[in-house]
Amino acid sequence: MANTIELDIRRQDTPYSPPYWQRFSIPHRRGHNIVSALMVIREHPFTQEGKRVDPVAWEFNCMEEVCGACSMMINGRPRQACSTLVDSLEQPIRLEPLSKFPVVRDLMVDRSKIFNDLKRVRAWIEIDGAWDIHQGAPRISPVAWKENYLYSRCMSCGCCLEACPEYATEKDFVGPAALAAVRLMNSHPTGRYHRRQRLHAIMGDDGLSNCGNAQNCVRVCPKQIPLTTAIGELGRQTSLQLLRDLFGESE
Amino acid sequence: MQTSIHNRHFLLRRLHSLFGLLPVGGFLIFHLWENSQSRFGQTHYNEQVVGWLQGINYLILVEIFFIALPLLFHAAYGLVILHGSQGNWNRYPWLHNRFYWLQRLSGIGILLFLLFHVGWTRILGIWQPEIRIDLFSHMQELLINPYLFLLYLSGLLLAVFHLCNGLWTMAISWGLTTSVEAQRIWFYFCMLLALLLGALGLHGMLGFLP
């Protein structure tokens, strides 16, 4: 086992300045993940040549792969920095910011596009109100609950969007994450009342049909969300919605 | 009320997808089967195959509305879809990512091949009636040239791949296959179909050689 951990990090000082690379070398310790390695650099911000530099800026939060904040390109793949163990990686480890979102600084990107896409597809559930409606909670079959649970794990980390060849900064494709949210909300017992609005939203410009079925999303998703199944199911829901729009509602 | 049928984008995409299978894909299968009869020889091919086709009622309308226009729409809108893809062939070396790119590259390849293929047979035949009368010899002259044979072979393989992979993605887009298992089984079926169609087309090409 090597005594040091070598990291190549893509730096960028401001959103508009050009990026540059710096190499850092830190003492090896068992069990390091990328976040803890970046913390060591932050404590001792010297490049391999011994030049003192600004500490690397990056985002992290939960340290247990549920918040989605620490997404970055690690050796060319979009991953969560907190759950990526250094010992499982080839060195030097290349760290880059996600390429499909505007860089704020170093490894920090502005992922607000994801939130806008969730709003675009109405990825929420409208409750009746804050008053008591004298009814119990709506019932969900264990089978449906189990399937929905898979989708509910999405943490908007952006890995699927990074890997998607149709998702791009200058294009407005809604992306697999928001589509999976539509799949989840449409099957919710209260959420299904706005199913048609959500389907119409993803049947609009840059919606579901922009998907090119490269299926990278499902492979890079750190939460193993069946994104391509969601896309297939939405394909079916929109096909049926198209028939309803053309020939009228059946119920 | 703004609904899906008032949105051009969704309808165009679905129409593009549908036209790829019907009539364009259907025509390709028919075309390959039809030309595989080249193995029966010159007389049979010129009289039974080409002669029968040329005797179809409203042939020119069928050609324009069931082959040319849908094909042109599929090709033109395909080029629109092509625009602005931002991906990486090498970064994600998985099969369907590679096929995503091949689907787009083959589309361009087929378009270039068809310009030559249709131009040199159907369009040229308008002015040169001897091509229509003896298409077998015309094709033999073309395919006997090893470079043109390779060109035809690549055109054939690209078209077959494009159809069969398109059939696979179409099943997801329209919601026929949803589960991973269903998509896998359908993928095997599509690739088997590609092999069969490739063999059928090659058989037809070899039939023209002396």
Image (cartoon, rainbow, N blue to C red):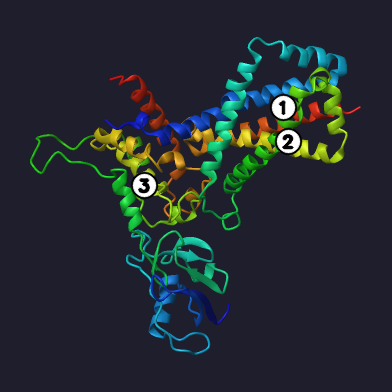
Q: Quadrant of the N terminus of chain A?
A: bottom right
Chain of the residue that carries numbered disc 3 in the rendered image: A
Give the label, 1 or 2, closer to the camera.
1
Where, by quadrant of the figure, is residue A244 drawn?
top left
Marks 3 and 1, how far apart in space? 48 Å
Q: Amino acid at mark 1?
A: Ile
Q: Is residue B135 above or below residue A234?
A: above
Q: Which residue is mark 1?
A: B123
* Residue at position x 55%, y 82% in the image: A3
Crowding near the residue tagged with mark 2, few <14, some 14–19, many ≥20 C-alpha atoms within 10 Å? some
Q: Amino acid at mark 3?
A: Ala
Crowding near the residue tagged with mark 3, few <14, some 14–19, many ≥20 C-alpha atoms within 10 Å? many
Marks 2 and 3, how far apart in space? 43 Å
Q: Which residue is mark 2?
A: B116
Marker disc for residue A173:
none
Q: Is residue B104 above or below residue B195?
A: below
Where, by quadrant of the figure, is residue A155 drawn?
bottom left
Q: Are marks 3 and 1 on the same chain?
A: no
Give the label, 2 or 3, closer to the camera.
2
Circle 1 SS class: helix
Q: Which residue is mark 3?
A: A178
User: Looking at the image, can residue B200 be seen?
Assistant: no
Q: Marks 3 and 2: in contact by CB < 8 Å?
A: no
Q: Are marks 1 and 2 on the same chain?
A: yes
Q: Is residue B2 above or below residue B39?
A: below
Q: Marks 1 and 3: in contact by CB < 8 Å?
A: no
Q: Are marks 2 and 3 on the same chain?
A: no
